[in-house]
């Protein structure tokens, strides 16, 4: 998560600011307007039901050809932590 360029908060205030990426844009979607930005500044606030809001946004998402970030994430999750077994 620390390498993400965008962090999307769906129905959560996620108060754990220490775990946010430092340079990422933060988008928060929540049905309760009072929850938006309650724990940290957000770059984009969307008030609404998560399911319908994401449905409305989905056509705006552009596919990226560069898969380096995704491939790195898959590699990390496929490698067990030291001392752990799968």
Image (cartoon, grey):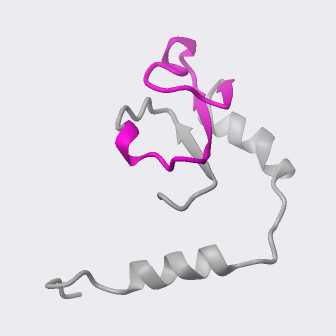
Looking at this rendering, what residue extends furthest in the left direction?
A: 83
User: What span is colored magenta in the figure?
Assistant: 17-46
45 w.r.t. 74: above or below: above
Q: How many labels does the image show?
A: 0
Residue occupying image coordinates x 60% and y 47%: 24
Horizontal side of residue 58 vs 4, given as left or right? right
Q: Position of residue 60 (x, y in %)?
A: 85, 49
Q: Position of residue 64 (x, y in %)?
A: 80, 70
34 w.r.t. 16: above or below: above
Occupied quadrant, residue 55? top right
Name the foreground residue: 62 vs 50: 62
Name the foreground residue: 40 vs 75: 40
Whether residue 22 is in magenta: the answer is: yes
Residue occupying image coordinates x 61% and y 75%: 70
60 w.r.t. 69: above or below: above
Residue occupying image coordinates x 54% and y 80%: 72
Looking at this rendering, what residue extends furthest in the front direction?
A: 22
Whether residue 35 is in magenta: the answer is: yes
Occupied quadrant, residue 16? top left
Horizontal side of residue 84 vs 22, given as left or right? left
4 w.r.t. 75: above or below: above
Q: Position of residue 61 (x, y in %)?
A: 81, 54
Name the foreground residue: 46 vs 23: 23
């Amino acid at each position: 998560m620390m390498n993400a360029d965008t962090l999307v908060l769906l129905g959560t205030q996620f108060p754990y600011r220490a775990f946010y990426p430092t340079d990422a844009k933060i988008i928060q979607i929540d049905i309760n307007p009072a929850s938006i930005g309650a724990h940290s500044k957000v770059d984009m606030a969307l008030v609404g039901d998560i399911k319908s809001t994401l449905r409305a946004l989905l056509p705006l998402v552009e596919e990226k050809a560069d898969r380096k970030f995704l491939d790195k994430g898959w590699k990390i999750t496929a490698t067990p932590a030291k001392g752990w077994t799968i």
